[in-house]
Image (cartoon, helix red, strand yellow):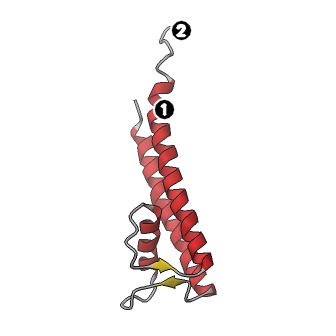
């Protein structure tokens, strides 16, 4: 049986990684203000960059905010790969936990 705290921990790491990646985008915009193409009605506020981070982290990708510079493209590529790798590894681990003890006997 998988403990609830294991699942909650995985969800927490996923949310925290989305927030962590969101902190890289303002730094990137300080270095190159044209690195990310934002819609006309937006101003690049941190809440918009959090949104962009989570859209990049998941396979959602609406496309209204897009990386333009090579640095922004590489950063978003790394975030997308991290998001998918984390998801696959986490699900594999959650599936494997109950199976790892399946062959063991309860006799001591």
Looking at the image, residue 89 lies above or below residue 47 = above
Residue 5 placed where, x, y %?
43, 42
* Residue carrying label 2: 108
Compare marks 2 and 1 and give the one earlier in the sequence: 1
- Quadrant where the N terminus sits is top left
Question: From this viewpoint, which residue is outermost toward the bottom?
Answer: 40
Mark 2: give few (<14), some (14-19) or many (20+) Cα within 10 Å: few
Instruction: Give me the residue at 58% from left, 64% from top.
Output: 78
Left of 68 or right of it: where is 62? Answer: left
- Asked if marks 2 and 1 touch (Cβ < 8 Å), the reply is no
Q: Dot 2: what SS?
A: loop
- Measure the alpha-carbon separation of dots 2 and 1: 23 Å
Residue 50 placed where, x, y %?
45, 73
Report the front residue among 10 and 78.
Answer: 78
- Quadrant where the C terminus sits is top right
* Residue carrying label 1: 96
Looking at the image, residue 20 lies above or below residue 3 = below
Callout in the foreground (2, 1): 1
Instruction: Give me the residue at 58% from left, 81% from top.
Output: 69
Q: Dot 1: what SS?
A: helix
Residue 93 placed where, x, y %?
50, 38
């Amino acid at each position: 049986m998988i403990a609830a705290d294991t699942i909650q921990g995985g969800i927490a790491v996923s949310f925290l990684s989305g927030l962590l990646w969101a902190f890289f985008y303002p730094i990137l915009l300080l270095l190159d203000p044209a690195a990310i193409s934002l819609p006309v009605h937006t101003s690049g506020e941190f809440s918009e960059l959090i949104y962009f981070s989570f859209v990049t982290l998941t396979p959602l990708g609406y496309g209204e905010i897009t990386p333009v510079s090579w640095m922004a493209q590489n950063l978003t590529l790394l975030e997308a790969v991290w998001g998918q790798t984390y998801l696959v590894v986490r699900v594999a681990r959650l599936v494997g936990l109950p199976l790892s003890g399946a062959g063991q006997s309860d006799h001591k």
